[in-house]
Image (tube, rainbow, N blue to C red):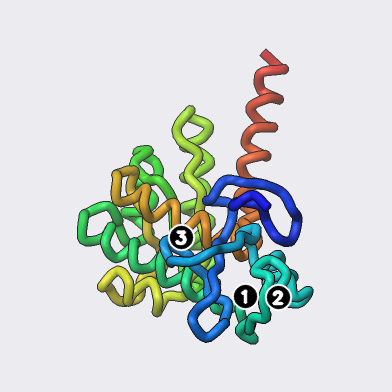
Amino acid sequence: MNDRTCIVTRRQAEADELIRFVVGPDSVVVPDIKRNLPGRGCWVTADRLHIEKAAAKNLFARAFKAQVTVPADLGGMVDGLLSRSALGMLGLARKAGAVVLGAAKVEGAVRDGLALLVLHATEASDDGVRKISQARRATVHLSGPAILAYKLFPEAELSLALGGTNVIHAAVLAQDAGQAVEKRVVALDRYRGGTPNDLAMLAAVADEDDAAEDME
């Protein structure tokens, strides 16, 4: 079996689209998020559905050709590891000056095309999210970057990671530190099933642009 073949789908993929697992000394299956643990590994498509399917169908034992113990909540364990990785990198980006906080500053970073992505706390009000979403749409209409937004963390986790209080809206800026955050946020979002509302928003903007071109 190819080193990067999902044990569930049997499809080959790039490393960023998969999660590696190894077996610890106690024969327990361990997620290797950083892909640097020693030993023979196996790979699973990087979303919770496939990982839980691999556990339920005893596919880890088949892949490792050995009796292994799968943690009862392997899906939740991986979610926690991905979440902590993203929050940790977010804190480093804040120290590097690659994060701005507060609705007004976030909206400004979006309209200026400086934002790489936007984070809303899960408690964010519809009104606060709407204003920033309007700025994101306007930026795309003006041929600026498509800036995606994510609701992945509660206010308490964002505040702790960013060293602030009552952090509801944050923008990660398009800098090297911001790109490292983006990679981890995208991985967590994909693991949790993606952000269909954002994809729908971008598709709607594209449709509007196509319609406008047809009328010219």
Q: Are marks 2 and 3 in contact (CB under 8 Å)?
A: no
Q: What's the distance in space between the residues labelled 3 and 1, CA to CA?
A: 17 Å
Q: What's the distance in space between the residues labelled 2 and 3, CA to CA?
A: 19 Å
Residue type highlighted by circle 3: Arg
Q: Which residue is mark 1?
A: 75
Q: Which mark is residue 35?
A: 3
Q: Which mark is residue 178?
A: none
Q: Residues within 10 Å of mark 1 (few under 14, many from 20)?
A: some
Between residue 70 and residue 155, name the one nearer to us.
70
Q: What's the distance in space between the residues labelled 1 and 2, CA to CA?
A: 9 Å
Q: Are marks 1 and 2 in contact (CB under 8 Å)?
A: yes
Residue 116 located left or right of residue 216 = left
Between residue 144 and residue 95, name the one nearer to us.
95
**Of label 3 and label 1, which has the lower sequence position?**
3
From the top left corner, tell me how far across and down residue 90 is, in percent: 34, 62
Report whether residue 124 is seen.
no
Which structural element holds mark 1?
helix
Q: Which residue is mark 2?
A: 55
Q: Residues within 10 Å of mark 3 (few under 14, many from 20)?
A: few
Quadrant of res 166? bottom left
From the top left corner, tell me how far across and down residue 7 is, in percent: 70, 60
